[in-house]
Image: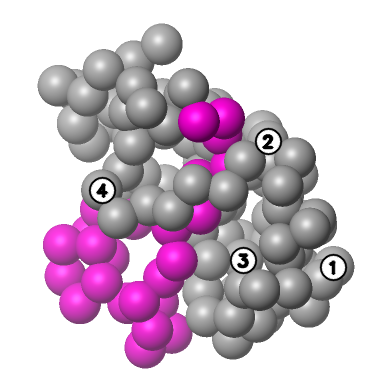
């Protein structure tokens, strides 16, 4: 599984917005209450506990950037998704906390 820094993800989203010639799915695996506080624009919420039941609905060819609070839950989900056959799974290193710190200091934190 690959890791991506908030800075590198921001460059992708600001530029062509593509990884391997595709727009990545930003998969936020936090809980709804966390997502309500802050989120990266365009991210889709799928709480970690719901991932096993919904993993089959994800496009196996599309790059997926998995996001959580600090990058630990997302890393676990990313490993799971790789085992489910997804070809390009990337963990956001440091999670939304690192994004808020490094990219968007105006973002609410918790």
Q: Which is closer to the viewer, label 4 or label 2?
A: 4
Residue 4 seen in this snapshot: no
What is the span of residues highlighted in magenta in the rendered image? 9-32
The residue under label 3 is 89
Of badges 3 and 4, nearer the viewer stands 4
Q: Which residue is mark 1?
A: 83
Q: CA distance from mark 3 to mark 4?
A: 19 Å
Sequence-wise, the earlier of marks 3 and 4 is 4
Which of 50 and 78 lies nearest the eye of the viewer?
A: 50
Pointer 2: residues within 10 angstroms few (<14), some, or many (20+)? some
Q: Residues within 10 Å of mark 3 (few under 14, many from 20)?
A: many
Q: Are marks 3 and 4 in contact (CB under 8 Å)?
A: no
Q: CA distance from mark 1 to mark 2?
A: 16 Å
Mark 1 vs mark 4: which is more N-terminal?
Answer: 4
The answer to whether 53 is drawn above or below residue 89 in the figure is: above
For the C terminus, give its image quadrant: top left
> In the rendered structure, which disc, 1 or 2, sits on the residue that comes first in sequence?
2
Q: Is residue 85 left or right of residue 24?
A: right
Indicate the quadrant where residue 15 lies.
bottom left
Q: Secondary structure at mark 2?
A: helix
Q: Which mark is residue 73?
A: 2
Q: Is residue 93 above or below residue 52?
A: above
Q: Give the vertical position of 60 relative to 47 (above or below).
A: below
- Residue 4 is left or right of residue 55, and the answer is left
Residues at marks 1 and 3, CA–CA distance in whole angstroms: 10 Å
Query: If you read the primary sequence from the N terminus, does the residue marked by circle 2 or circle 3 appear first?
Result: 2
Specify whether 62 is left or right of 11: right
Picture quadrant where residue 105 is located: top left
Colouring mode (rainbow / by chain / secondary structure / one colour): one colour
User: Of label 1 and label 3, which has the lower sequence position?
Assistant: 1
């Amino acid at each position: 599984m690959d890791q991506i820094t908030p800075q590198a993800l921001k460059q992708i989203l600001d530029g062509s917005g593509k990884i391997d010639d595709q727009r990545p799915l930003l998969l936020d695996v936090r809980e709804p209450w966390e997502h309500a506080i802050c989120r990266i624009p365009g991210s889709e919420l799928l709480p970690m506990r719901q991932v096993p039941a919904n993993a089959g609905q994800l496009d196996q060819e599309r790059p997926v950037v998995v996001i959580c609070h600090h990058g630990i839950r997302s890393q676990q989900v990313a490993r799971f998704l790789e085992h489910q056959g997804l070809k390009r799974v990337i963990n956001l290193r440091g999670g939304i906390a690192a994004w808020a710190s490094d990219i968007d200091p105006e973002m609410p934190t918790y």
